[in-house]
Image (cartoon, grey):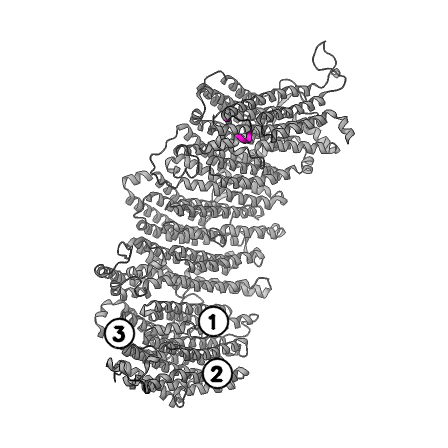
Amino acid sequence: MLMLLAVFVPILAGVLVLALKNLKENRGVLTGCFTAVLAAEAVLVILAVMGGGSVTLWKLTDTITLGLKIDKVGSLFAVLTSVMWLLAGIHSTSYMKHEHDEQRFYGFYLIVVGVLAGLDFSADLITMYVFYEMMTLTSLPLVLHELTKEAIHAGLKYLFYSVAGAFLALFGIFFLANVCGNLQFTAGGVVTPDMIAGKEGLLLFAVFAMIVGFGTKAGMFPLHGWLPTAHPVAPAPASAVLSGVITKAGVIAIIRVVYFIVGPVMIRGTWVQYAWMVLALLTVFMGSMLAYREKVMKKRFAYSTVSQVSYVLFGLSLLEPTAFVGALCHVVFHSVIKDALFLFAGAVIVRTGWTRIEQLRGLGRIMPKALAFYTLAALALIGIPPASGFVSKWYLATGSLASGTGALGFIGPVILLISALLTAGYLLPIMIQGYFPGQDFDGQEIKERGLEGKEPEPAMLVPIGILGIASLLLGCFPGPLIAFARSVAEMVL
Amino acid sequence: MYDSLMTAVVLLPIIFGFLLLIFNNPIRSGHHERTMEIVTECLVLVNSLMVAALIISTGGRSGNLVLFRLYGQLTVMFKLDLMGSVFAGLVSFLWPLATLYSFEYMKNESRRPMFFAFYTMTYGVTLGVALAGNLITMYLFYEMLTFVTLPLVLYPMTREAARASRQYLYYSIGGAAFAFIGLVFVLSYSAIGTTEFVAGGMLNPELAGQHKNLLLLVYVLAFFGFGVKAAIFPFHDWLPKASVAPTPVTALLHAVAVVKSGAFAVLRFTYFIYGTSFLRGTWAQWAAMTAALVTITFGSTMAVKEIHLKRRLAYSTVSNLSYILFGASIMTPLGLIGALTHLVAHAFMKICAFFCAGAIMHQTEKTYIHQLDGLGRKMPVTFTCFLMSGLSLMGIPLFAGFISKWNLIQAALSWGGDAVAAGIPGGFIPYVGVGVILYSALMTGIYMLTVAIRAFFPAVGAALSSGSAVSAGAVSSSGSTVSAGAVSSSGNAASAGAAQSSGTSVRTEGEEREASDPSWLMLVPLVIFVIMIFVIGLHPEPLLKILEMIGGEAG
Amino acid sequence: MSFVQNFPFFSIIIAMFSGIVSAVISGKKARNLSIFAIGVTTCMSAAVLAYTWKTGESYTYMMGHFPAPWGNEIRAGVLEGLTALMFGVVMLLSVMGGLDHTEKDVEGSKLNLFYIMIDLMLSSLLALVYTNDLFTAYVFVEINTIAGCGLIMIRQWGRSLSAAIRYMVMSSLGSGLFLIGLSLLYDVTGQLLMIPAKEAVAQLAATDAYVIPMLVILAVISVGLAIKSGLYPFHYWIPDTYAYATPAASAVLSGLVSKGYIFLLIKILYRVMSPEHLMESYTLDVLYWFGIAGMMMGSIHAIQEKDTGRMIAYSSVAQIGYIYMGIGLGTQAGTTAAIFHIFSHGATKALLFISAVGLYEASGGERDYLSLRGAGYRNPLAAIGFTVGAMSMVGFPMLSGFISKLLFATSAFENTGKLLPTLIALAISTTLNAVYFLRLVISLYRPEKRKVDEVHRDSWNLRLAVVCFILLNLVLGLFSQPIVRAIGQGLIMFS
Amino acid sequence: MFAHLMLNIEETVSMILFGIGFTTLLLHPNLIKKIIGMNIMDTAVYLFLAAKGYIAGRMVPIMSDGIQDASAYINPVPSGLVLTGIVVSVSTTALMLALTIRLYERYGSLNLDRILILVKEEGKT
C-alpha cells in the first residue's frame, strides 16, 4: 500500500500542480507544497522500503500483469532517488525563481519522481518497461524547459535516443516473453537453458539489444550522443537529477535484465559479456576525454556523467560479486557527487551567469563555501581516499582483476586509472582557478557587479553542502552500504 | 429476421445515399442542410444500432443469406461470422462519431448533400465487405467501395484532387483486377464448388496440391491485388495523395474503412480461402511477408520525411496497414489475432490522429507541421488527443497500440522459432519483422511526437509571445494527463488563454483568427476515441477473447 | 414446318425492302419505316429464339426449292436467334439515341439515304447471322461494307470522308482476301453450303489431302475477317471511322458491324473447318496472341487519345482483342465468352457513344476530354450512362463487363497453356481500361471554372436510349446465367 | 514446280493478279489507282473462279438449242458466283469513285496521304 502511495502521490500531486492554474500567483504556496510533497515522498519511500511486500496493479491481459514489489536493489535505488530528488528540489525552489514557467517545471518534476519510484519498485520486466517509457516522456519537459531552439533540439534528441533505446530493449522483452512467459524479477534470473534450447544465439542477441537499449539512458556508447546535449540545456536542478538519478534508471534496468531475468550464468563468458565490457570501457575513456576537452561547465559535467555511469556498467558487466558491490556503491556515490556538481553549476549560473570554465576564475572570492563543497565532491569523484569515489573504484578494480575475463579484466583497471587522472584534469582546474586565480587576476568584474562574498541563497547552498559532505562521509564510512551491496550480490550471483 | 437485418444494414445507407443525391437540389435550394444532417446522423446511428443488435443477437454467427445468383456458382451472399462481426462492429462504432465530426468540419462547404450521400453510402458498402459470406460478394463490395469513395476524394475538385482520385482509382481497379485472378482460381480449385469463406481454407487439397506453385503465384498476385487498397509497397502511392480529400474522408475512409477493407480482404483470402496450412512455409508466405516489411519500413521513413501533417499521417497509415498485413502473412492463429488486434487498435488511433489534424485545419487552416508551433496551447484538447494517439501508435504500454504490437510480435517470434526449428528456408524473416516493427515504432515516435512537441513546446520566439505563457501551465496539464479529466479543465484554460491573448498577443502573419479548440461536435468524437484507445490499452481482454476464438477457428 | 421458321428469311427481306422503299420516300417517313422495320425484325428474332429454344434444335431453311449443293440456305438456332435479337435491340436503341444528331448531321434531302443504309446494314447483319452459305455471306459482307461506308460518309465532313475512304480500302482488302479464301475452298471442296463443305473438309482432313491449301484457306479467311473486324494490328481504320461518323452510325458501327464479321468467323471456324486443320494451322493461337496484343495496344492508344470519340473507338480495338482472345482459347467456354462479350460490348459501346453525344451537347459540341469537364453536372443522365458504360468496361460486378471478364477467365482454365497469359492480360487490360475511362468519368464530375449555366436537357429519345442501354447492361450483368446457357446451347446446335 | 505452275496457268495468273491488285490497293496513295487495284484484285478472283468452273470441251450453260444432258455443260455455279461478284464489285467501285469525287472536290487531290494531312490541318483550325 505504501509503495502505491510512493508511486502515485507525487504523480497526482504533479498533475494537480499542472492543473491548478492559480497557483502561479502564490509562489510561496507552490514551492511550499512542492517541497512538502518531495519530503513526504522521501518518507513514503523509506517507509515503503521498510514495509516491503508486493502488489498487483492491473491485469493487462491474461499473460501480462503489472505489479510492484519491493526488493533490495529496488529499495536502494528508490531511496537514493527520493533523497536526491528532495535535495535537488529544494535547490530548485531557489533556482527556478529566475526561470519562466516554474509551475510546469514543478509539476513534471513531481511526476517524474513518482514514475521513478514505480520503476524501482517494478515487479516484472513489463511494468518496468511501462515506467521506463513514462519516465522518458515525463522527463522530456524538464529537458526542453528553456524552450530555446537549442533546448528543443536537445529535447528531441533526448526523446529519440531514449525511444530508440527503449525499442531496442523492447525487442528483448518481446523475445523473453515469448520464450519464458514469466518475466517476474527473480534474483539470479528466470531463464533456464531448456527454455531457450535452439535459440541461444537469439537470446544473446536479445540480451545485448537490451543492454544497449537500456544503456542509452545510462549514456553508454554507442547511444550516448543525447546526454551531453540534453543535460546541460535543462535547468540546473533538472540537470542534476537527470545526470545523477535518471541515468541510473538505465542502470537498474540493466541490472534487472541481466541479474534478475536472464541470469548472469547465461551470459558469462559469451560474446555479449565481452562486447558489453568493451563498450563500457570505451565509454569510460571516451567520456573522460571529451569532458577534459569541453569548455562549457555543464557540458563538461555531462561528459563526466557519460564516463562515470559506465564505471557502473563496467562493474556490472564483469558479473563478479566484488565488482557488483563496487558498481552499486558507485551508483550511490556518483549520484550524490554529480548532483552536487550540477547544483553547484546551477548556483554559479544563477549568481554570476557564467557558463564557461575560463570565466570561473576567482570564484572563490564570490562563493568560497560553495566552492569548498564542490572541491569535496570533485575529490570524491576523482577517487582520492578517503572520499567516496575511491571505495567504489577500489572494488571495481579488484573485481575486474578477479573476474577471470582475461585481458579485458586487466585492461579495465588501467582504463579506470587513466579516467581517474582525466577526471582530476577536468574537475580540479575549476577549484584551482576559483581559489587561486593567479597574479594577473584583478577581480574587476566581480567587484563591479558587487558579487564579492555573495554565497548562493541558503536553499541552494544547503543541498550543495549536504551532498558535498555526504560524498566525503560516504567514503569514510562505507561499511553499511558495502554490506548491503554484498548481500545483494550474494543473492544474484 | 436477422437475415433481413443483415440486408437492411447494408442497403439502408446505400439507399439513403441515393435519396440524398436525388434530393440534392431541393436540399440546397431550400436550405434544409441542418435537417439533412440530423436525419443523416439519426440514420447512421440507427444503422449502427442495428449492426449491434445483429451482432449481439446472433452472437456473431449467422446463417447464410443468399441474396441473388450472379452467375453459375457465384452468389451474392451475406454471412456474419466473428471476424466479420469485429470489422462490422468497429465500423459501426466509428461511423456515427465520424459523421458527427464531419458536420462541423464540412460546415462551410458547399455541396454537402453530395458529400453526405457518398459518405453514408460508403458505410453500407463497408458493412457489405464485412458481412460478405463469400469471395465474390466481398469482391463486389470491394469494387463498389472504390466507386463510392471516389467522389469523396474528388470532393475538393481541385486539380490535385482530380489527380489523386485518378490515381486512387487506377490503383484500386488495377488491384482488384489482380485480385480477380485469385477469385477465378479459387472458383476453379474450390473444394466446395463455391467461393464461400471457410475458416481454415476451402481449396481442394488434392487439386491444389497438383498445381501448388501456380496457386502460390496466384496467392501472391491476389495478396498484392487486395493489398493495393491496404497501400502495400509499391502500390502505396495513392494513399498519401488521397489525403487531399476532406479530413473526415481521410480519417474514416483512408485510415479505416477503405484501407482496412483491403487488409480485411487479405485476411479473408489468406485464412478463409487458401488456408494457412497450404501457405505456411512456402515462398509465397515469405514474399508476402517481405512486402509487408518493406512497406512498414518505407511508410514510417517517409512519414518522418513528410512535412505536410495529413500526408505524414497517411504515410503512417501506410506503414501501420502493413503491420496488419504482416500479421496476416505470419499465417498462424496468433498472427491472425495480432493482425486483427492491430486492425481494431489502429482504427481508433489513426482516426483520432486524423481528426485532430482535421480540427487543426478547420480551426486554423494550417496544414504543414512547421506551422503548428505553439498551437497546443491554444487547442489543448485537440493536441492532447493527438499526443495520446501518437503515443499509442508508438506502442507505449497502457495504450492500445502496445497490445497489438505485443500480439503481432509474439506471433512473429513463435512462428519464426518454429520455422527455424523446422529448418524452413526463410525462417529468419519473422525475426527481421520484429526488428522492422521496432524500427517503425521508433520512426512513429519521431514523426508523431515532433508534432506534439512543436505544438506544446514552441521554440522561444517561434510563434507566440505573451499570451501563450498565461495558459501554458494549464495547457501542459492536458499534455500529460488522462483525457477525460483534462477536457473540462483545459477547456476553461483555453478560454481564459484566449481571453487574455486577445488583448495582448502579437498575431503571427497570416493568422486570420485566434485558434481555439473546435466545438463539441468535433471534440466528442475525439475524446471518445482517446477513451477507446485507453480501454483497449488497459483492458483488452474481452476483445482478445473474441479474437482468440477467431484465431482458433481459422488457424 | 412452323410459320416461325420463315422469320429469319422474312426479317432479312423486310429490312431490305424497307431500304428499297426508303429510296423513294421522304426522310421522315424513311426514319419511321426504318424504326418500324428494326422493331419488327427484332420481334421476329425474339420469336425465332423462343421457337428454337423450345424445340431445342436448329433448323435449316431452304431458299427456293433448290436443295444442296445448289440452293441457298438459312440456318437458325438459339445462338443465331439470340444474336439477331441483340443486334436488333442495340440497333434500335442506337438509332433512337442518335435521332436528333442524325437530323442535324445529315442534309434533309439525304436523310432517307441514311436510313437506307441503316436498313441495308440491318439486313446484311441478319443475313450474316443466319446464312448457311458461304457465298451469300460474302455478298452480305460486301453489302455490309457498302452500308457501313455510306453511314460514315453521309456526314459531310472532311474527317468522315477520309475515314470512309480508309474504311473502304481496308474493307476491300479484307473482302478480297475473304473472297479468295472462299474461292479456294470451293476449289478444294466444291461446296459453298456450310454443312456439305464441312463434310468435305472432314474428309480431306481424314485423308490428309490438300493440307497446304487448307492452311492457306484458313489463314486467308481469318486474316480477311480480322481486317474487317479491326483486330490489332489491322485496326488503323477504326478510330476515325467510329469517332467521326454521326452518333447513331458510330454506335451501330462499333457495336455491331465488326461483331457481324466475328460472328461469321466463328461460324466458319466451327461450322466449316475441321478441328484438325485448326490445330495444325495454329490459327487459333495466332488469333489469341493478336487478340491479347490488341487488348493492350488498343488501351494504350486510348490512353494517349484526347478526343473522346477516338478514345472510345480505340477501346473498341481492345474489346475486339478480348473477343479474339476468347476465340483463340479454342474451347467451347472460350467461344461462349467471346460471344457473350460480343453482346456485352455491343450494349456497352453503343451506350458509351450515345451518352458521349449527350455530353458533347452539354459542352458546346467539344469532344476533347478536357472540355468535357463538369459535363456531369450539365447533363446528368448522359454522364450516368457514360459512367455505367465505363464501369462495365472496367468489369464492375453486376454489370455486363464483369460477367464477360469472368467468363474469359474461367474458360481459360480449360486451356492450361494459355491460363496465366489470359488472366494477366485480363488484369492489365482492366487496369488500362480504368485509366482512360475513369479518367474521363472523373473529369465529367469535376466542376468547371465557368459557372454551370443550365442543365442540358436531351431529347426524350436520347434519354430513353440511354436508360434502355443501362438496363440492358444490368440485365446482361445480373441475369447472365440464362443468356450464357443459351449461348452454350446454341454453340452445341451450331456445328 | 514450274511445270505445276504452267499446268495450272489460270490459277497462277489469277494469283499473280491478285497480288498485284492487293498491293496496289494497300500501298498506292493515288485513290484512282487504289480503285483500279481493287478491281484487278476482284478480277483475279473471278478469273480463278471461272477457271475452276471451266471444263474443257463443254458448253456454256445457256440454253440456246434445247436442253442437253448436264454433262454437256460446264459447271454453272462458278459462273453464277462470278456474275454476282461482278455486281458487288461494280457497286463497291461506284461507291469508292463517288467518295473519291467528293474528296477531290473538297481537297483538290487524289493522293490519300495528302488528303489525310489536309484533313488533319482542317481539324486543327
Q: Which residue is mark 3?
A: A98
In the foreground, B134 or B456: B456
Quadrant assignment, res C467: top left
Could you tell me residue D113's position as x and y percent?
Answer: 55, 31
Q: Position of residue C60 (x, y in %)?
A: 62, 24
* Quadrant of the rendering where the N terminus of chain B is positioned: top left
What is the chain letter for disc 1? A
Which residue lies under the disc numbered 2?
A415
Question: Which of the chains bears the disc numbered 3?
Answer: A
Instruction: Estimate the spatial distance between the alpha carbons at disc 1 and disc 3, rounded to whole Å.
Output: 49 Å
Is there any visible trace of residue A343 in the rendered image?
yes
Q: Which amino acid, mark 3?
A: His
Is residue B69 among the parts visible in the rendering?
Answer: no
Looking at the image, residue C35 sits to the left or right of residue A372; the answer is right
Q: In the rendered view, would you say A144 is above or below B29?
A: below
| Region rendered in magenta | D107-114
> Which of A403/B528 is in front?
A403
Q: Amino acid at mark 2?
A: Ile
Q: Earlier in the sequence, mark 1 or mark 3?
A: 3
Q: Residues within 10 Å of mark 2 (few under 14, many from 20)?
A: some
- Describe the element under mark 3 as helix, strand or loop: helix
Disc 1: CA contacts within 10 A as few (<14), some (14-19) or many (>=20): some
Image location (x, y in percent) of residue A400: 50, 84
Find out whether residue A245 is within the magenta segment: no
Q: Eyeballing the image, is C60 above or below C275?
A: above
State the image coordinates of residue C131 (x, y, percent, origin top left): 60, 25
Q: Residues within 10 Å of mark 3 (few under 14, many from 20)?
A: few
Numbered circle sitting on residue A182? 1
Picture residue at 60% right of the left edge, 64% below the top: B423
Q: Chain of mark 2?
A: A
